Amino acid sequence: MMGSSLLLAQFLCLLFFHSHSQPAHSSSNFSSSVQLCPGDQSLALLQFKNSFPMPSSPSTFPCHPPEKVLWKEGTDCCTWDGVTCNMKTGHVIGLDLGCSMLYGTLHSNSTLFSLHHLQKLNLSYNDFNRSVISSSFGQFLHLTHLHLNSSNFAGQVPPEISHLSRLVSLGLSSNSGELMLEPISFNKLAQNLTQLRELYLGGVNMSLVVPSSLMNLSSSLSYLQLWRCGLKGDLPDNLFRRSNLQWLDLWSNEGLTGSFPQYNLNNALSHLDLSYTRISIHLEPDSISHLKSVEKLYLSGCNFVGSNLDLFGNLTQLIELGLAGNQFGGQIPFSLGKLKQLEHLDLRNNNFIGPIPDIFVNQTQLAWLRLSDNNFQGHLPFSLRNLKQLSRLQLSANNFTSQILNEFSNLTELTELDLSYNKFDVQIPSLETLKN
């Protein structure tokens, strides 16, 4: 009896170990004859896909290359590309069909809206042929991520989007300027989406939304993209002081006014774009110099107060700096040479004069250098030879006169070189000749 009991105990231990050593949620635990995906959800997915005709040309899509949705009827939908299931219940909880060549109208009675367990939905980079965003999206009460970027939606953003109180990320950008977000819908969105951390509304018409209402957005917000939204009026400077805000893009809201704060700045900002707004930016140490974490800073066509460009040299984390179209004069400040991590520098369309100073000695990461449309003259800086990563160099529309330097032969990564509209005293050789 003791021997048989010992054998039984050993058998049970082996069985327990084997069952617990297998991945709990792996689809490999199910034989090919067992379908995890419920039949109604599999059918809903197939009907959704089949409701869109195959487009005649993939060139109509904003991504390359787009990929066809290839789902095989009769197989487990939990194994289909772009489909994620809860491996306990089988419910479809994720659908990623970004850049999937979906073309046509997304109707409000689409079987997509029967997938009530969805938590993440991505339909970006398709072409829904100016469909209205259906109020049926408000039925996805479990959604945490909803991305409908660059998919040719049009009309009003429905107020039912505000029903999605669990949303962490919402993307409606780049829909051909055909989407509109009215104040009532925006206020409901700001009031109810209290967990929102990412909001992408680039290109959505918000011209009737009062900028001060942006302060009602979730305090958890870390990414806010509002480029070319038609915003106008005073932007509260407290928006720049939000402790969680890391990414703020307000590019090309030309009616947006206000003032960039000169004290108590948010040190978490890593990406800031105020280009082509009328927000006043004071070039004083207490403002710009405090952006210690900023890596990408775009301030082209801005409303600057003062011209102390030396302050930008204090932002040692900068990877990209855009200051085009600001009518800055004098020489390029030597302090920019301290930005050793800089990859993109754009100083086009200003009034800089004199020879370009040798500030590029330590900027070995620089890939794009744009200095066109200024009043530079004399020779090109010898330190250009150090820019081994340089791929784009734009020096057109200046007054350079000296002979082209043979240091271009060191720039093996260079793919674009624009030296047009200068006063060189020799014929400009081709890029291939310079590199050889």
Image (cartoon, rainbow, N blue to C red):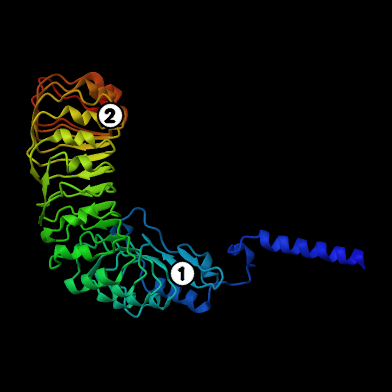
Residue 388 picture location, percent across and down: 31, 27
Residue name at image x 21 percent, y 71 percent: 187
Figure check: 337 above or below 346? above
Q: Nearer the viewer, residue 94 or 335?
A: 335
Of the residues shown, which amino acid type is indicated by label 2?
Answer: Gln
Q: Residues within 10 Å of mark 2 (few under 14, many from 20)?
A: many
Q: Position of residue 275 (x, y in %)?
A: 15, 48
Q: Looking at this view, is 172 or 45 the one in front?
A: 172
Q: Quadrant of the N terminus?
A: bottom right
Relative placement, left or right, of 350 versus 3 is left
Quadrant occupied by the C terminus? top left
**Residue 155 in sight in this render:** no
Q: Secondary structure at mark 1?
A: strand
Label 2 secondary element: loop
Is residue 259 toward the left or the right of residue 161 in the image? Answer: left
The residue that mark 1 highlights is 93
Quadrant position of residue 106: bottom left
Q: Would you name the residue on which mark 2 appears?
A: 363
